[in-house]
Image (spheres, helix red, strand yellow):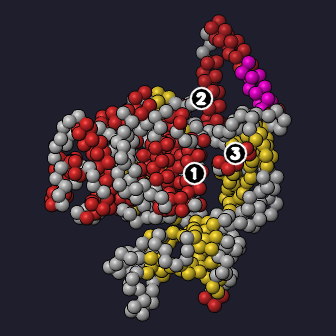
Amino acid sequence: APSAPRNLIFLINETALFLTWSPPSDSGGRKDLTYNIMCQRCGASGGEEDCEPCETDLRFVPRPLGLTGTSVAILDFATHANYTFHVETVNGVSGLGGNTRPLANITVTTDQTGPSLVGVVRKDWASDNSIALSWPEAEQQPNVILDYEIKYYDKEQEQSGYSSTRTKALSVIVTGLKPSTVYVFHVRARTAAGFTAYSDTFDFSTGDEDSGMAADHGQVLVVVTAAVGGFSLLIILTLFFLITGRCQGIIKAQLKSEDKRRADFHNAPPFPGIKTYVDPDTYEDPTQAVHEIDPSRIRIERVIGAGEFGEVCSGRLRTPGQKEIPVAIKTLKGGYVERQRRDFLREASIVGQFDNPNIIRLEGVVTKSRPVMIVVEYMRNGSLDSFLRQHDDHFTLVQLVGMLHGVASGMAYLSDMGYVHRDLAARNVLVDEGLVCKVSDFGLSRVLEDHTEPAYNTMGGKIPVRWTAPEAITYRKFSSASDVWSYGIVMWEVMSYGERPYWEMSNQDVILSIEEGYRLPVPMDCPGVLHQLMLHCWQKERGQRPHFNSVVSFLDKLIRNPSSLLTLVDNSFPESPEDMPGYPLFISIGEWLDSIKMSQYKHQFLAAGFTTLDSVSTMRIEDIRRIGVSLIGHQRRIVSSIQSLRLQVLTVQHNGFHN
């Protein structure tokens, strides 16, 4: 008999509860696996004697018994109830031996829809594309509020979907809106027990003069007055310095300016609910806003890797409450010069400004003793690319989309702060023990200019070509839109379980192929809707790429409606090759397999009668499995390469050349 399903988890929102799991580690030697869901509703005590079968009006989509997939949606559940779900694996001989079937169990408390803790939502001010909102703190809070979620949509285009954002403050500035447009907003709180109910809906318009624009005018007046006064003062001081030659005034002015910059680095932003990134390169000491840790509180346990500046270790950090937490510790090797020390600590000065569950958290730095250290939270599962390669084909589609959702949420936060990453890749995303993905490695990152389409020219250095947008490669112009291109590559990495983008193509071949219109093909077993999102991220014109907030909303809808993930791209290969790459012309099967590091399968291909590139280009996934390519990762590599090889064969045939 098969063993129990693995990795049983749940996701819940206001209307549906989703269960998802992985196939069992032992299938019982058979392939005819199905799954049954059994449900109990238990009282507050949670004891066996306090449980009874679930109510009959609880709906399972597609059904509770005989499931061939590894997920199910549950509708019409009661609020403030405890449900225990049992999932069993069944094959064609289950039950014949009379043995007890192993079950995977999970208990879900449906108290996410408690009463709303948000009453009245006010509009403080509005511009053509932004609205500032605030709301009073609830008088009675049954649980500590972790943050607030603001959901909003265009009132005249409600059917086109909604967007959402989060804040820990009692206010938020919602940006990226259309001018002179009415938007509908409602807010809910998130506590340790889950989300509360949404507030009532509130309609607010962008670009109107009535509610809040006076505040804008006041702010503009203050800014203009200060600017005029500052300019006049600058002229007077300049004349004074030129006439008297007293340099002491210049020094004092510089010190005052430096004090102001430091205050800006520490102080809260001018508007509530929004935070702006400050480039540490503009400060004499970029670590001034970073928490200094007493080295006696750090215990290094073992070396787990090597970084650009020294070793990376795991260890423990003793908190002020005497509790020890696991941390990762980056150390600066001895014999460094001051420039290396500054470059090493620069990343800490960047990460220290971020506060988001999908961005790696900085615990602090050690700069007053040796070795110099950066201390961050410990991510047990390491980098996303290696984690996926180690667990090839072990996750459900919903779990993979959940990982992508986490990365997109972190990038949306960075984008909202006016910040570009420049090196977004699966290797620079870390995974914790709960499969939460967090963006890390800010060594190449830079601040964006305050511009309608912020971008800037780099000062040189290496560019990760396989993950970088064409305008960033050609013109060294980076923006949030170029980060979106990189995110599309991360999507491809995740859905192909850590495969190398563009395989063994050289960087120059990658650049030329992209310029000619080539885009990475759909990974094996990838839903078509996800590949369409990748292609959307890879639009040549950066203005046509989606914003990260839109990506987050889209993935959120997929998670809430997992049936939309069930449509896979056909395993046959496309009929039209217009978007396939121009690969080097291979003469033999052996050369082709060598190019994709699969030469060990040469004998199987030849023995099965696939002796020419023409015959290989017509293969289907069933043919690949039949000849003995059993490893999922190898199948993916061959499938993707054949799609590209097909163009080569058709091109050769078109020009009158045959193998």
Q: Do callouts 3 and 1 mark residues in contact (Cβ within 8 Å)?
A: no
Secondary element at tag 1: helix
Which residue: 71% across, 34% down?
179
CB-based contact (under 8 Å), mark 1 and mark 2:
no
> What's the magenta region?
215-228
Q: Please, what is the three-letter code of the amino acid marked with disc 3? A: Gln
User: Label 3 belongs to which residue?
Assistant: 157
Residue 447's spot in the image, x, y percent?
53, 35
Query: Which SS class for mark 2?
Result: loop
Mark 3: few/some/many CA within 10 Å (<14, 14-19, 20+): few
Q: Which of marks 3 and 1 is in front?
A: 3
- Closer to the camera: disc 1 or disc 2? 1
Residue wearing tag 1 = 554
Q: Which residue is drawn at 28% across and 45% down?
A: 646
Q: Position of residue 123 (x, y in %)?
A: 79, 43
Instruction: Give residue 5's position: percent from left, percent from top.
Output: 45, 75
Would you say 156 lies left or right of 591 here? right
**Where 619 falls versus 442 (above or below)?**
below
User: Going 50% across and 72% down the picture, which residue do you hit?
Assistant: 8
- Looking at the picture, which amino acid does disc 2 mark? His
Q: How far apart are marks 3 and 1 (CA)?
A: 16 Å
The label shown at residue 451 is: 2
Near-viewer residue (171 or 374): 171
Mark 2–mark 3 CB contact (< 8 Å): no
